[in-house]
Amino acid sequence: MHPGTEATTCLTSHVPPRHRPAPQYPTAAAPAITCINRADIPAVAAVAAHYTQDEPVAGWLLPDRRRRPAALRACFVLLIERALQNGFVDLLAGDRAVAIWLDRTRPLPAAPDQLQRLQEVFGPDSDAVLLLADIAGRHTPPIPHLHLAVLAAPDPADAVALLAHRQQRLDRVGVATFAYAANQVQLGALMAAGFQPSDPVRLPAGPPLWPSLRPAAQRPAVAGRPAAA
């Protein structure tokens, strides 16, 4: 994401995340959310890569700036393919923001070729992505939830609007959501959407990540794929 305003930076720099007030973003008419299909995967992956290529985690995973855009696009293709089968991909009108969700209300089906495909994408940086997956897995909550694997949005207000679209559906069926905030601006957007961050997890010789949970609404969850509408 792009850097936030001076006020947001000041707010997020001096207050511990769990005690920090959520930023307030102006309300507006609900934006259009585009449903994508397999034909859209390359274009949506390119949008997500464009918005995330300068984030600290992207630099930690792929130090070579020249390789980074293509590797991220290829990685997001794999992730979107999986989300279309076991989750959701929400695209804000005008390609302003992308959210990629994985359905963890039940065990994710195995993807036997996933490791090989990731190694082909990341090449010499494969160890970093495997380490990231291992660290992230240790802090994933052991409850049914939707995992926000990617939130690519340069404008925090767009991020909040995109989150609200999915969370309104999840609240009807009582499903929690979980995400890792990759920077302070993203953390603020997640908090504005109701996520509760815990202490940051720092990648080895790298940036911090904030595990953040949005508890389920107090309604009984239903069987099957959540919030398919």
Image (cartoon, rainbow, N blue to C red):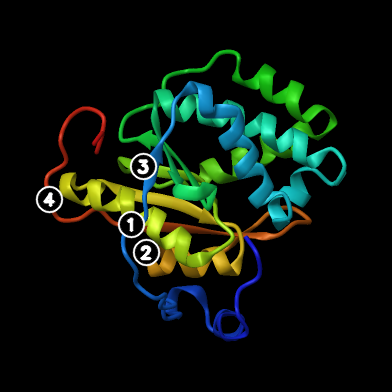
Query: Which tag is nearer the camera, tag 4 or tag 1?
Result: 1
Q: Residues within 10 Å of mark 4 (few under 14, many from 20)?
A: few
- Separation of residues labelled 4 and 1 (CA atoms): 17 Å
Which callout, 3 or 2, points to the residue nearer the camera? 2
- SS label for mark 3: strand
CA distance for labels 4 and 3: 16 Å
Q: Give the spatial CA distance, label 4 vs label 2.
A: 18 Å
State yes or no: discs 4 and 3 in contact (Cβ < 8 Å). no
Q: Is residue 200 above or below residue 33?
A: below
Amino acid type indicated by mark 2: Ala
Q: Are marks 1 and 2 in contact (CB under 8 Å)?
A: yes
**Residue of label 2:** 193
Label 4 sits on a secondary structure element that is loop
Q: CA distance from mark 3 to mark 1?
A: 14 Å
Nearer to us in this view, 160 or 207: 160
Residue 129 has which mark?
none
Q: Residue at x 45, y 48 (%)?
A: 93
Q: Which residue is mark 3?
A: 146
Location of mark 4 (residue): 219
Q: Which residue is mark 1?
A: 164
Q: Name which residue lies at 42% across and 75% down.
A: 25
Q: What amino acid does circle 1 point to?
A: Ala
* Kind of element beneath mark 2: loop
Relative to the observer, which residue lies in front, 6 or 198? 6
Label 4 is placed on what type of residue? Arg
Circle 1 crowding by C-alpha within 10 Å: few under 14, some 14–19, many from 20:
some
